[in-house]
Amino acid sequence: MLFTLMSAASFTTFSSVIVITLLSLFLVTFLLFKKRKPLPPVAIWTDIGHDCDDLIALIVALFQHKVRNIRIIFICTVSGANKKRADLVIWLCSLFNITDIPIIASERELAMTTKGVLLRKVIPLWEYDLSLGGGNEKYVKTNKKLSQYLLEHGMKISDFNVYTGNSSVDMQRTLLNCEIGVSCLIIGPGAEPAAFDVAKHNIRRVIWQGNANDTGAHGSFNMNCDKDAYEALQTVFKRLNVEQHYVGRLAAFKTMLSATDFYRIKKSFSNGVSSDILRKILMLGIKEFRDGNRSLFYDINQCSDEFVKQLPSEDCRWWEAMLNDGKGSSPMYDLCALVYLLNLVGVVPVMYQTHTDTQGVTHVASKKDDVLDSDTYHHFIVSSLCESFAAI
């Protein structure tokens, strides 16, 4: 009898352990499944290489990818000299030790039908030394190769998935076909309409950096310099019935950095490496505008000091004077478009109000400043740069 009771008690205890173990496994599995919800897929088309816009936007985007807020399915370089632009993307990815994003250099170098040059007539950033660290007084041109930059942090070109030539369109289409609900960020001219020959469920939305008027006609640089491709893309997007969003320039004025902002960002870094990269990107980007049309540059960025206005652009003092005079850095239009995308996919709070035209297209900051709270928005921009550059 005693043996029977002991056996029953043991069995009851054993059963309890099994039940508790199974419940624990179920709970852990449930929590893991709940945590691992699919990340929003994002594809980016960029003409990185001429101004600070694309570089800053991609640094923030890569940080968001690294911390698993979004999943960048590829970055495609467009607008001409696309292999050199892809080298800059590889360099940025190497700063974050990111090797899981396909990098595609578009085969098309010219406007789709007119065969006009899409490449802006300025000295591209890849001709300057973008090494980590360095002096503060001058910027110099260099013949340094990408492989040398990568060696600075223990990487090589073969670590990255890079696609060029006539496989570029097929690769974009293949990667889009593998996804559901991609958010497409177009921050440069030259995207290939054939790359979007996919099913309706593959693409959720398209975010354009730039204005288009309320009839859907082309307006800003990214649409206007490649009109035929833009119109062909409109045909494709309407067939797919995807959302289209246009982020204009007005909200981007809230992204300009003052000397105080720049000092705050520098203080957030554990060393001078990231602040040097930020300084180089910001100055080199706006430097090209200053070199290209100095008269127009100083019409926009008023300066009473003739000595500063005449300084060669390789001398940092003109840029420091612009920050200290309260003018701030140049607006970061592409970063503004990226933040709007992060808003749409739920990574950041809603910061914009929008209006929809008669064609069902959404516009942001095309006719008015659509930032809901300017101070909060600017604080978010500065905080995003602090986080992103500190991760380098």
Image (cartoon, rainbow, N blue to C red):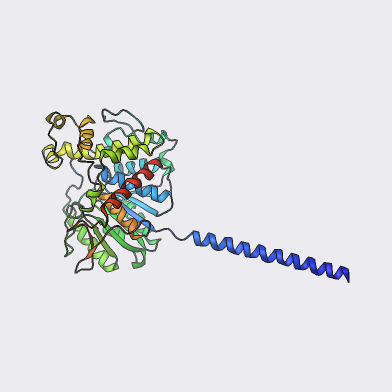
Quadrant holding the N terminus: bottom right
Please indicate, yes or no, whether residue 122 appears anywhere in the rendered image.
no
Residue 32, image x, y percentages: 53, 59
267 to 178, vertically: above or below:
above
State the residue at coordinates (49%, 59%): 36
Question: Which residue shows up at 19% across the image and 37% down it?
Answer: 325
Tell me where residue 183 sits by quadrant. bottom left
Q: Residue at x 32, y 45 (%)?
A: 382
Q: Quadrant of residue 262?
A: top left
157 on left or right of 16: left
Percent x, y of residue 315: 22, 29
x, y (%) of residue 291?
17, 36
Q: Quadrant of the C terminus?
A: top left
Up-down: is 388 above or below 22?
Answer: above
Residue 295 seen in the current view: yes
Q: Residue at x 18, y 58 (%)?
A: 368
Q: Splitting the image into 4 quarters, where does residue 28 fall? A: bottom right
Task: Tell me if residue 312 comes above or below residue 240 in the rendering.
Answer: above
- Residue 252 position in % (x across, y down): 23, 50
| 313, above or below 300, in the image | above
